[in-house]
Image (cartoon, rainbow, N blue to C red):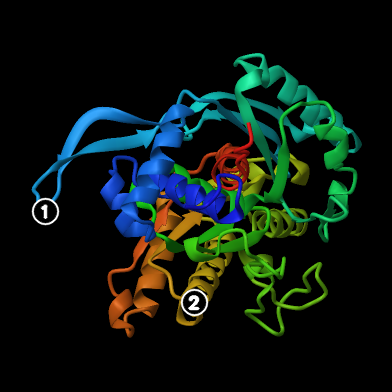
Amino acid sequence: MYKKDSEVYIQNVSSVLEFIYRNPRTSRIEISQATGLTPAAVTNIVAELMNKDWIKETGDEVSFVNGSGRRRKVLTLNNSIGYLLGVEFNMKGIFVTITDILGNVISRDYKNINKYAITHINDEIINLIENSITKVDSSKILGAGIAIPAHFDLTSETIISNNDMWKDFNLFEIKKHFSFPFIVENNIECMALGEYLFNPLNTPDKFLFFHVGHGLFCSFFDSANLGIKANYYIGEIGHTVVDINGPKCECGKKGCLQTYISESWLIKNAKFFFENSTNTILSNLVKNSEEISLQTIIAAYKLGDSYFKRNIELGIELLGTSISNTLIMRDADKIFLNSELLSHKEFSSQIVDIVQSQMMFIPSKIDLNIEVTNFDNFRGSRGGCALASFAFFIKNLNYSQ
């Protein structure tokens, strides 16, 4: 028997908690069979977690096909033990979400990026958090996860990004105002973790989570390697080259995928077209180029503007090809596509058809599960809640208390 404060014991407890997250109605024997822990070890861990009120027996029983034919008590997480706080900031603004331990949303708050100076981002995050935690018992907040549109160096606690506008973000300035712990991670990785923990019945252990927004990123999610990422830039699919003679990207290369299908480049190109063309539907939709948004571009496409029809469909075709190429090199049991653009039926059907047609030559991928998510601006901040759960509930428990 391992001591309760030993690294092995804590890892075993983490394995049990993660399994219960992924299997909301389970039993001791199922946990033992799936994790490889002995029935006695599982019984002891479950007893301790029940004493702490972290998990509970529902009162239901389930039957299993085994020699004894015994019915087993159903175990589940106790969603009343505390709260999780998630924050995301991006080109649209700052989003804050509070959930229970199962990811059920308790509160949401938001501030548009046009309503504050970006140099004051730390103060704005602090103010939004302070306002949000008044809606719950703040002493029960287990931790906070901040989802950022970049990468984060844990040693220096600084953002790693080509976008200089986030340089004033300072984790230390934020966390010193609160008693609960903080952790930071890339926003798309947080979204993927949110699907894994909070949507377990619809999410396999290995999947790809593609995000198409201001930029492009792919989370290569594998439950066997959670938290392990030696190279920050793995997943930057927006900077894969799809045309060596294409437009010059801000990264310095030519023909990056994001120059064809990211929101920032679609809007950039639309503004140029508006200012240099006399034959565009845009002139009926906006008065000047600064009014052009993604919704303006989608409206022009639906109204039949040939320029936007040609360019958006080219971008979708290149994206679909890039996804298919990724699947040839990296196996996955499901694909999530998260995008405000692709959430429109006209575009979601196109991208799914392209990927499926290009994967027909691989028998195991003929019926590949591709899900275009219902676009939600708070998906990143809810993913921050999942990050907080993973860091401060599942993986970082204090058994000396």
Instruction: Measure how far apart labels 2 and 1 are at the Cα level.
Output: 36 Å
- According to the image, label 2 marks what residue? 330
Above or below, comparing residue 377 to residue 59 in the picture: below
From the top left corner, tell me how far across and down residue 227 is, in percent. Answer: 61, 59
Residue 5 rendering spot, x and y as whole percentages: 61, 46
Residue 24 image position (x, y, % from top left) = 34, 41
Residue assigned mark 1: 65
Query: Between disc 2 and disc 1, whose residue precedes?
Result: 1
What's the residue type where badge 1 is placed? Answer: Val
Tell me the residue at 44%/75% (across/down).
331
> Image point 87% across, 41% down: which residue?
170
Mark 1 element type: loop
Q: Amino acid at mark 2?
A: Arg
* Residue 292, numbered circle: none
Which element is circle 2 on? loop
Q: Residues within 10 Å of mark 1 (few under 14, many from 20)?
A: few
Residue 181 seen from this side: yes
Quadrant housing the C terminus: top right
